[in-house]
Image (tube, grey):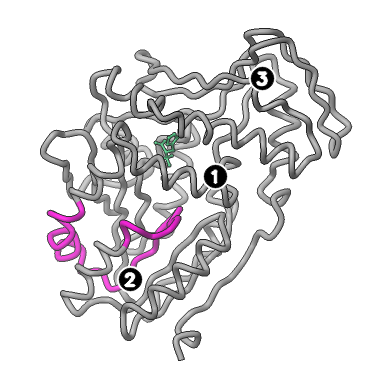
Amino acid sequence: TADAAVMIDSHLDEAHERGLADDVLDGLTRPFKELPPKHFYDERGCELFDAICELPEYYPTRAERSILESDAEAIVAATGATELVELGSGTAAKTRVLLDAMSDASRLRRYVPFDVAESVVRSSAEQLVAEYPGLRVHGVVGDFERHLDRIPGPDGGQRRIVALLGGTIGNFPPGSRRRLLRRIAALLGPGDHLLLGTDLVKEPAVIEAAYDDAAGVTAEFNRNVLRVVNRELEADFPLDGFAHVAFFDRRNEWIEMRLRALRPCSVMVGALGLRVELAAGEEIRTEISAKFTRTRVEQDFAAAGLRLAGWHTDGDERFALSLAAP
Ligand code: AVJ
């Protein structure tokens, strides 16, 4: 049966195991308030993110897909990979392009999706084994920053691609970004490759529109983190009391999303016995999303002991997929 081909290891089952309580306690008692972006992604958050990917302003998903569509065959050939490990696999929409290229080269053996969202890992695993005869899926539910070492080793000396797509690496500030790359590098044996998706530096107005769409979907996505905190930690953030803010920080070359309190606001986080006071106009930073140049990608790889082995961009140079080798 299909089920024999699927195995899921879960290292998280409750939102608090993602560190939500710690992140709220740390992040909302700082002089400059902050919540990490991983808490956007409950079921509703995943749906909102999928809706963002369809927006006319949000180019990264389409740009990355177009690179995969034109270059997946070359990428698969250059790596000789038979296994795909995907970090932050989400709904695995773009993954199919890579799996198709591996399958066309008669090289597809195993897919290892790794994500915080258990339901998404489970349902994509089941769909994929039904779609690709002979494919085995070993899903891992966990947090990037804590559970990368739970990823199974290569199956019998197979070569693999470890993919971190979508520009997710941009959510990590420079120091943690390099630490994450070092941990990923530790998963690579000789002959293995990292496939990294990075959004590229471009005209700020284009980037800002992508994170502040006319339909207001990104604003809802941003406010969703407050819904998650309200539900999981018995808090009472008034959602209509916060405006969505997105701006490109030219010095750091990253987009920043914030939630700005429209009026003075006193919030109780029941589960933590914590009262959080916000002044009118005070902001909570909810995400940074760094934009890259080829030089920056090469430097980050070098800092993690990796070398750039391939560089693929879309025709408009909006986005890049790079291959790195140990
Ligand atoms: C999923 C992290 C790649 O930074 O572009 C989309 C998330 N935030 N719109 C990004 C996001 C606002 C996205 N990543």
Give 281 or 14, whichever is nearer the viewer. 281
The quadrant in which the C terminus is found is bottom left
**Quarter of image, ligand 1:** top left
In the image, the segment drawn in magenta is 68-95
Residue position marked by numbered label 3 in the rendering: 241
Q: Residue furthest top?
A: 280
From mark 3 to mark 2, how far is it between C-alphas?
47 Å
Residue 197 image-quadrant placement: top left
Percent position of residue 263, x then y? 69, 10
Is the residue 251 above or below the residue 219 in the image? above
Residue position marked by numbered label 2 in the rendering: 83
Q: Amino acid at mark 1?
A: Gly
Percent position of residue 113, x then y? 44, 64
Q: Nearer the viewer, mark 2 or mark 1?
A: 1
Give 260 or 308, whichever is nearer the viewer. 260
Q: Amino acid at mark 3?
A: Gly
